[in-house]
Amino acid sequence: MYSIEFREGFDYELQNRQFALISMSGVARRLHGDPQLSFWGGYSELERFNVPRYEQAAQRWGMNAKPTGWTKTRGTLIGATPKFMLRPLLKFAYPKTVKYLEDLRRVRGTGPKDGKAFLDYMVDQEVIQIEMMQLALSGRFSDITPKLEEFFRKYENKELFS
């Protein structure tokens, strides 16, 4: 069995990924032609890229990767954020995401040894989110897609469990 700290932390992360998938997809659908789409759409792509990897980890560790009703509700509400509120939302979320990265590093440290490659991926995908946020907040939207594509190339064929 896995420690309570790991199970609670990873369960929270599973719900966080579902929340991000729902909310980022909701925002991205409304931004066609807007320069911000490279961030919000890229974030949505990252979450879709995460899905099979997180589902594999959840299944391996006997956990449920499906979103709860509360996760779906929160994601849908945030996904409907008006366009003029997206920058303030990002400014609000950025420091919380930086802090959450430290939480994920702690979860990684309590995780099963046979999951090291996945747990490193879990932290890396949070790091790329932070880097994307930094670029978006500085108005460097055109730098987001190449950074995200580099991340995808790094992990697209990488086996996260042996």
Image (spheres, rainbow, N blue to C red):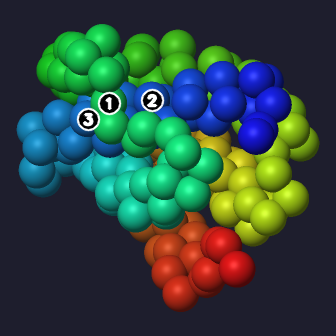
Q: Secondary structure at mark 3?
A: helix
Q: Residue 93: x and y, percent? A: 53, 20
Q: Which mark is residue 145?
A: none
- Residue that numbered label 2 is attached to: 15
Indicate the amino acid at tag 3.
Ile
Marks 1/3: CA–CA distance? 9 Å
Query: What residue sits 22% from the left and 42% below the top?
Result: 25
As drawn, 78 above or below 58: above
Query: Residue at the spot x=89%, y=42% of the render?
Result: 109
Q: Earlier in the sequence, mark 3 or mark 2?
A: 2
- For residue 83, side relative to residue 139 (left or right): left
- State which mark lies toward you, 3 or 2: 2
In the rendered structure, are the residues bearing label 2 and label 1 in contact, judged by CB atoms less than 8 Å apart? yes
35 versus 11 height, above or below: below
- Judging from the image, what secondary structure is the residue with disc 1 in? loop
Of the image marks 1 and 3, the number of the one nearer the N terminus? 3
Residue 63 visible to the viewer? yes
Locate residue 156 relative to residue 61 in the image: left or right. Answer: left
User: Quadrant of the rendered structure where residue 94 is?
Assistant: top right
| Callout 1 touching callout 3 (CB < 8 Å) | yes
Q: Quadrant of the C terminus?
A: bottom right
**Vertical arrangement, residue 35 with respect to residue 151, above or below:** above
- Residue 103 visible in the snapshot: no
The residue to which callout 3 is attached is 22
Report the amino acid beneath label 2.
Answer: Gln
**Residue in front for this viewpoint, 56 or 2:** 2
Give coordinates of residue 159: x percent, y percent. Answer: 62, 81
